[in-house]
Image (cartoon, rainbow, N blue to C red):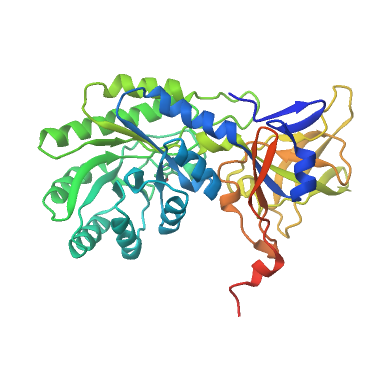
Amino acid sequence: MPHGFQYLRGRLHAESAPLEKIAHRFGTPCYVYSRAVIEHNFKRFDQAFGRYPHMVCYAVKACSNLSILRLLARQGAGFDIVSGGELYRVLKAGGKPAQIVFSGVGKTAEEIDTALHSGILKFNVESEGELDILAQRAARLKKRARVALRVNPDVATETHPYISTGLHEHKFGVEMKVAERLYHKAASMKGIEAAGVSCHIGSQLLDFAPLLEALDRLLALALRLKEAGLPIRYLDIGGGLGVPYRSGDQRPDPAAYVKHILAKVEGAGLEVIVEPGRSIVAESGVLLTRVIYRKTNGSKHFVIVDGAMNDLIRPALYQAYHRILPIKQVNEREATITADLVGPVCETGDFLAKGRSIPVVEPGDLLAFATAGAYGSVLGSNYNARPRAAEVLVEGSRAKLIRKRETLADLIRNET
Ligand SMILES: *Cc1c(COP(=O)(O)O)cnc(C)c1O
């Protein structure tokens, strides 16, 4: 793992760029990403496959900044998209249509048409209704749509209920039993090529076991379908690999995961597709904030920072934990307080961290919230009429603005 964020001469740096300087130049709150970490994580997946036919399709929804998509496209990444908007972004960033897979439960006819015109690799279809619409649109446009049904392998995962997707009670995918019937229907449809199988069972999985169990079930399905004469070529096992948010969490190694995958698929004659999002970008980013005030209510300490739930909603939405990195390195004997770190938004749910022991900070001090590269900036909103944060990409000692902080004029641009 390259050093994305580390203390040099007592100050926190992104690669070799001091975060103090970045805050001074671009303001706070601000997302800061390390290019080396993103490239390293992508390569861990990609290189582990060696010569085995594969495609690493980065899940765009984890962090969709154009510059980040562009640097992944240059590394040879494919992309997993879930909307016409993400397709637009990927194409703008130089992603190749032949390396795009389109997932999602609610693709509209308009989005399907655009994707067919662009010539994407395949659609991961999530219902019979979608299959029917896709066949209609493809026939009308005289195109052939390569299809994988997203099946629900009914594997339980130990993750937060909001990011678990692989059980029959979730809205995603179709049941295995239903899938076999739908595949035979798909095979007979003009305009449809039953080209693969797919699944995605959840996110932030720190253990390979459920992923590999889903793979077993998916592989068995693919082999049955192949035997029945369907032109199945792609085995798409989705994303879901987790990252350590707390110190002490395990760090599942993508290369080790891929080794397990290869051991199972060797000889099956299928191209493997993975769709990692979080495991590529989470550890590449921090949310950099500045302390505005400190206050106490009774015995309770609050540190009020200029970043809020509209910038990073994960703590409020998933009870997510982000480590706090003070910009000035803490020495052992320093006094600490136990505090909630909250933002300026008018909601009790507006917190970035609760009950944390941190060094005594003063207004003006900088704090970084770690592991914020995935599902951070993309979930940003303008709630409380707060302009969205800037985004900065660091390469070595160079810091580049990759998304300007929104202005007040941006806030009302589309309103009358
Ligand atoms: C969200 C999503 C992913 C990426 O999941 P991560 O946990 O971020 O790796 C991959 N595939 C699909 C279909 C998704 O919805």
Residue 311 versus residue 343: which sits nearer the camera? Answer: 311
Ligand 1 picture quarter: top left
Q: Quadrant of the C terminus?
A: bottom right
Q: Residue at x 13, y 54 (%)?
A: 189
Name the residue at the bottom extreme: 416
The image position of residue 68, as x and y in percent, is 54, 43
Number of on-image labels? 0
Q: Is residue 17 above or below residue 313?
A: above
Indicate left or right for 172 with 38 as reference: left
The image position of residue 286, as x and y in percent, is 66, 40
Indicate left or right for 403 with 356 as reference: left
Q: Is residue 205 above or below residue 376?
A: above
Indicate left or right for 164 with 362 as reference: left
Q: Is residue 115 above or below residue 51?
A: below
Residue 202 figure quarter:
top left
Residue 81 versus residue 73: which sits nearer the camera? Answer: 73
Residue 139 figure quarter:
bottom left
The image position of residue 300, as x and y in percent, is 84, 44
Q: Quadrant of the N terminus?
A: top right
Q: Residue at x 85, y 22 (%)?
A: 332
Residue 48 figure quarter:
top left
Residue 83 versus residue 116: which sits nearer the camera? Answer: 116
The image position of residue 258, as x and y in percent, is 39, 24
Q: Residue at x 70, y 48 (%)?
A: 30
Residue 347 versus residue 274: which sits nearer the camera? Answer: 274
